[in-house]
Amino acid sequence: MKYKLGDFVRFVDEKMEGFVTRIIDDQMIGVTGEDEFEIPVLASKVTSVHGYEPAGAKKAAVDNEAPVLAGEFEKKGIYLGVVADTKANSVVHFHLVNTTSFTLLAALTTEKQQVFKGEFAEAVSPGSVVKIYSAQLADLQLWPTFIFNVVYSTKQNIEPPAPLVAREKFKAKDFSTSKKQIPLLKDTGWLIRLDEPEMVIDAQKLKESFFKSPEEKVVLDKPSNEIDLHIEKLRDDYQFLQNSEMLNIQLAHFHKTLDAAIVHQLPDMVFIHGAGNGVLRNELHKALGKHPKVQTFMDARKEKFGYGATKVIFK
């Protein structure tokens, strides 16, 4: 098989292009285009598109290592940055991010049902990032285990740490956090640290913690007058959640903002829940009907929300 996951290809007989997101067998591959649909196709019916590089795929060449002062030499900071492709959001690219002052001799091996495959092996220069793997996010349950082996190297008089070996078996919860800026990469995504940060003990804070009162006042920020409860507004990983999990998250946010509105003595508030099948709306109305601080509630402005929002008036 001449193609690998993440390769950008163009169909020979049609005006279509996309990423290789599945190796079906020695003859067939799956290609996902901008419409996010995967199309099975004979490998002989596509051709590689040369010159396309996803953000961060290019890395600085490993050349003469610039001297770094001993006090400024970074010994920690190896990350895995996972970024959705700009052309096909269902495809994610894995980047090895080296913020240390070491040159990393890095290798990635995948393992699935005791079948091992070397996916990447290169030297990664200090302060650089390189793409090492691609996969389809919808197939997360089928992803292999990732095994990282890293050897540290420097021409300076610095003792290198012991080689790093890290195993990662990704689950949906690993992508449940909000996306953040990836170091050295002009893009946002999920950031996973492969090496442990050095522990810094603040003696003063440690001392203060011994005398800290166990009871702290909970501060509730003043909420907006309109609260959107659509799950995609609350979680980035909503596509991995069960319906019951989505409902629990929405209700928890509803109760939190309702309490905050009462604390800050707002006269009213609108909860945007959508029309849908009415399950969330019914749960909200059930809770509001029993709440001692709620004077009444009604459908919010129908010309703006239709039947997809509820206005609450407080006592």
Image (cartoon, rainbow, N blue to C red):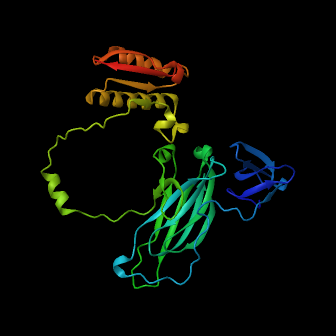
Spot occupied by residue 124 in the image (x, y as percentages of width and height) = 54, 72
Image quadrant holding the N terminus, namely: bottom right
Image location (x, y in percent) of residue 278 = 51, 19
Percent position of residue 113, x then y: 60, 51
Q: Is residue 259 above or below residue 180?
A: above
Please name the residue shown 28% across and 26% down the image: 262
Image position of 161 with respect to 109: above or below: below
Q: Locate the C terminus and report the quarter of the image it occupies.
A: top left
In-image side of 23 versus 68 (left or right): right
Residue in the foreground of this view, choosing between 305 and 109 = 305
Which residue is painted at 45% across and 61% down in the image? 194
Depth check, front residue: 208 or 301:
301
- In the rendered structure, the answer to whether residue 20 lies left or right of residue 189 reads right
The residue lying at 41 percent from left, 81 percent from top is: 68
200 shown above or below 280: below
Instruction: Name the spot of residue 47 as percent of width and height, x first.
Output: 81, 58
Q: Residue furthest front?
A: 303
| Total labels drawn | 0
Q: Does residue 200 appear left or right of residue 248 in this picture?
A: left
The residue furthest left is 211
**Residue drawn where x is 39% and y is 62% of the image:** 196
Q: Is residue 159 left or right of residue 107?
A: left
Depth check: give the residue in front, 264 or 134: 264
